[in-house]
Amino acid sequence: MNRNMRGGAVVLSPRDNVATATRDLETGTSVPLGEMEKRHTVVLKEPIRFGHKFSLKPISKGTAIIKYGEIIGLARQDIPEGSHVHLHNVESQRTSHRVKRLCRSPAMREEVRHKK
């Protein structure tokens, strides 16, 4: 877990493919994430408001959005690394039967488990 909030964001689980902004971040900001040898920097493609999510890597349409190590939704469209991840490009797990079916799928559970 990356709790270095001075970098402007926090990753809550090593399985996550999104980070949460701990302050307002501007377009072009380089956000350092990760620990020591796994250090990774994400350059933001757009402004990210405090508390909002951005992608840690490219996320393809239909791919699970993972926060807290759990699937919270599916990408409605391709989401480039460093882009805002929110209602406009995520199909929420709370409202989607398709996401619920995917979450129950052994293949998806295995994929999420291997991202540890």
Image: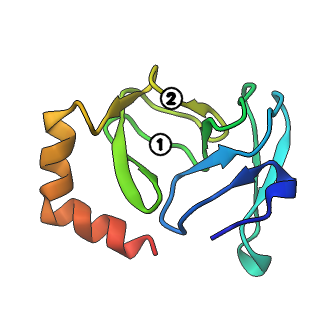
- In the drawing, does residue 5 fall left or right of residue 57? right
Camera-side mark, 1 or 2: 2
Q: What residue type is labelled 2?
A: His
Q: Where is residue 37 in the image (x, y as percent from the top left)?
A: 76, 80
Front in this rendered view, residue 15 or 23: 23
| Residue placed furthest toward the top | 88
Q: Residue 59 carries which label?
A: 1
Looking at this view, name the residue that lies furthest to the bottom. 37
Colour theme: rainbow
In the displayed structure, would residue 106 be above or below residue 31? below
**Residue at label 2?**
86
Count neighbours of disc 2 (C-alpha within 10 A) and say few if under 14, some if 14 to 19, many if 20 or more. some
* 33 sits left or right of 53 in the view: right
In the displayed structure, would residue 59 be above or below residue 6?
above
Q: Where is residue 33 in the image (x, y as percent from the top left)?
A: 74, 60
Q: Place residue 48 in its image quadrant.
A: top right
Q: Earlier in the sequence, mark 1 or mark 2?
A: 1
Query: Is the residue under label 2 in contact with that under label 1 (CB below 8 Å)?
Result: no
Q: Residue at x 43, y 63 (%)?
A: 69
Q: Is mark 2 on a helix, strand or loop?
A: loop
Q: Determine the residue positioned at 79% across, 64% down.
A: 4
- State the separation of the CA atoms marked 1 and 2: 13 Å
Front residue (pair 3, 18): 3
Q: In this view, does 98 lie above or below 101?
A: above
Give the amino acid at mark 1: Ile
